[in-house]
Structures are given as structure tokens and as C-alpha cells.
Image: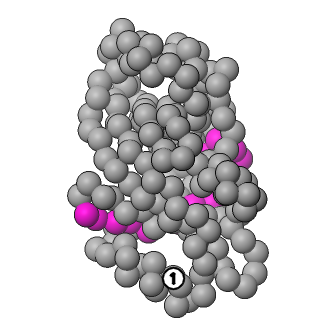
Amino acid sequence: MQLEIEMKAKIKNKKRLLKKFTLLGIRNKSKKHYVDIYFSPKNGKRFISFKSPRLRVRKDMTSGTASFEYHLPSGIYGGKEREVTISDGDMMDVILKHLEFIEEVRVDKVRSYYEYRHFNIFIDEVKGLGSFIEVEIMNANNRQTAIKQIKQLMDDLGVRRDIIQDWYWRMMLKKKKLL
């Protein structure tokens, strides 16, 4: 399992943020369109709390591929995840539903990937929620050091005060009044 530490913030001024990217030498790498589908067991505890596991099918609408992810949270800023590539995201949906999992919510987003030092930086345009920046460190050796480094970069980008301690799927559930 990979240890992932991440933080996200609402983007108030995308033009200003991209200007800071240029000044810091943060380079655009690629852009993808994803539809993420989150599942919970039909009977039993729903996977909707900060402490519960998460099951997700991610459909990459850009390449036509998909992945299946199991995520164990470790606090608000991170967790451990296992992910496998699958050839057919629609069939995975069918399998999960036959195994009596229910679809909790879908998150439709266009994600722009950026490179900077040891950080993964994303700008997400999330349908129904708006624009966000997400900064992550994968396989962090020390959780607290990674959090500190991410917060420093968020300061440098001028978005730290806009940090959101929630996930897109939970924000969507709240918006639909399902949480």
C-alpha cells in the first residue's frame, strides 16, 4: 500500500494561481477527464465517514481505461491505498452491484496535472463543485514532514487559508443532502 498525503483548497482566482505556477517553475504535464464512482455495502456500514474505507471505480474518459481502488484513510490528509487497472469500468460497476454494493455518488472532474519537485499538483474542475487545487506527496517517509511541506507550498501559492478538509465525494453527498 502506498502512503499518500494530500491537501486541497478551493481556487478563488485561477489566473493568479497559474501566474504563481509560472513564477515557481511548476509545469503542466497533462489533462484528463475522470468519472469517479464511490460504493458502499448495501447492508452494513456505509463508507462515507472520514474513518471508513473507500471503494472507488475511476473511469478515465480521456483514455477509455479504468481503475478500482481500495483506500484506508489515515486522518484527514492521507491514507493508504491499493489500486488496480481494470479493462472495463462499466463491468466493474455491474459486478459490485451484483455483490450488493450501492453507488453512493459520482464525481465528474477534469484534472490538469502539474510537476514540481517531489509534489504532485492537480487543478480539478469538478462538475457541480467548482475549481480546486490539490497537492500530494506519494510514499511519504514521514507524515508530519509531508504535511508541513505541503502547507509551505500552499502558502507559497497563496491558497493555504482556503484549504478544505473534505473529499469531493463527501462534498457531493452534502450538496445532494445525502450526508
Q: Does residue 170 show up? A: no
At horizontal 56% and vertical 14% (from top left) the residue drawn is 158
The magenta-colored residue range is: 64-78
| Corner quadrant of residue 26 | top left
**Horizontal side, residue 11 vs residue 175: left or right:** left
| Corner quadrant of residue 34 | bottom left
Residue 107, image x, y percentages: 51, 56
- State the residue lying farthest toward the top: 23
At horizontal 72% and vertical 62% (from top left) the residue drawn is 178
**Horizontal side, residue 124 vs residue 28: left or right:** right
Residue labelled with disc 1 = 96
Report how many numbered discs are placed on residues in the image.
1
**Horizontal side, residue 113 vs residue 10: left or right:** left
Q: Does residue 93 show up? A: yes
Q: In the picture shown, does residue 43 fall above or below 150?
A: below
Helix, strand or loop: magenta stretch: strand
Residue 41, image x, y percentages: 66, 79
Rate crowding at label 1 as few (under 14), some (14 to 19) or many (20 or more) other CA atoms within 10 Å. some
- The amino acid type found where label 1 is placed reads Leu
Quadrant (top left/top right/bottom left/bottom right) for the C terminus: bottom right
Colouring method of the image: one colour
Q: Nearer the viewer, residue 69 or 74?
A: 69
- State the residue lying farthest toward the bottom: 98
Residue 145, image x, y percentages: 61, 29
Residue 73: within the magenta? yes
At horizontal 26% and vertical 38% (from top left) the residue drawn is 30
Residue 177, image x, y percentages: 73, 57
Residue 44: within the magenta? no
| Corner quadrant of residue 47 | bottom right
Q: In the picture shown, does residue 178 fall above or below 11?
A: below
Q: Nearer the viewer, residue 179 or 148?
A: 179
Q: Nearer the viewer, residue 157 or 94?
A: 94
